[in-house]
Amino acid sequence: MNSESDSTYVDAPPTTVLDQVSDIARLPEWNSAITEVLESPPLSTPGAVWKVRLHALGQTWVSTSTLAELNEAAGRFRYRSQTDDGNPSYADWEWLVAGDGPGSRVTVTVTLHPITFWRRHLLVKLRRPALRREMQASLEWLAAKLEHFRE
């Protein structure tokens, strides 16, 4: 299985959490692998595209993400990311934010789709542990930033 998932409680309403997670310009604040946002369009319709510069495993590359869904009522933010080097491999990301008492339960899931031989048999195995740590760190940052937030 090429999926990883993690969740945490955040002491803020779901709409606030979803706004934070889907604010592309602020990604480098809470995702340590993202060093720079290169393009950040409004996420008003599926198909919107943004680009970021990533640094992991000693390498730097540009990743393009395409919005699949941003549904505030359902607390869902889904997108597909892919390197800009022509490799057909990609990752599908989903953020789910649900009310949990006075705050929110935030769950992030990534499903990796390594298409080429080297990504399928080598890079995905090398990248997964770091990806798990990055997901946990992002959720921890989000929980700390929005701790005791009240609208």
Image: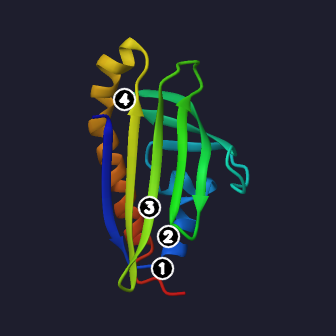
**Which label was assigned to residue 64?**
none
Q: Which is nearer the eye, 78 or 84?
A: 78
Question: Dot 1, crowdedness within 10 Å: few (<14), some or many (≥20)?
Answer: many
Nearer mark to the viewer, of 2 and 3:
3
Earlier along the polypeptide chain: callout 3 or callout 1? 1
Marks 1 and 2 in Cβ contact (< 8 Å): yes
Residue 57 x/y as whole percent: 36, 29
Earlier along the polypeptide chain: callout 3 or callout 4? 4
Measured in 3D between alpha carbons, the distance from the residue under mark 1 to the one under mark 2, in whole angstroms, is 6 Å
**Residue at the location (59% across, 47% down)?**
68
Marks 3 and 4 in Cβ contact (< 8 Å): no
Residue 101 x/y as whole percent: 35, 84
Residue 26 x/y as whole percent: 58, 57
Q: Which residue is mark 4?
A: 57
The amino acid type of the residue labelled 1 equals: Pro
Q: What element does badge 3 sit on?
A: strand
Q: Which residue is mark 3?
A: 96
Above or below, 89 relative to 96: above
Q: Which is nearer the eye, 141 or 90?
A: 90
**Which label was assigned to residue 17?**
2
Measured in 3D between alpha carbons, the distance from the residue under mark 1 to the one under mark 4, in whole angstroms, is 35 Å
Residue located farthest toward the front when viewing the structure as drawn: 74
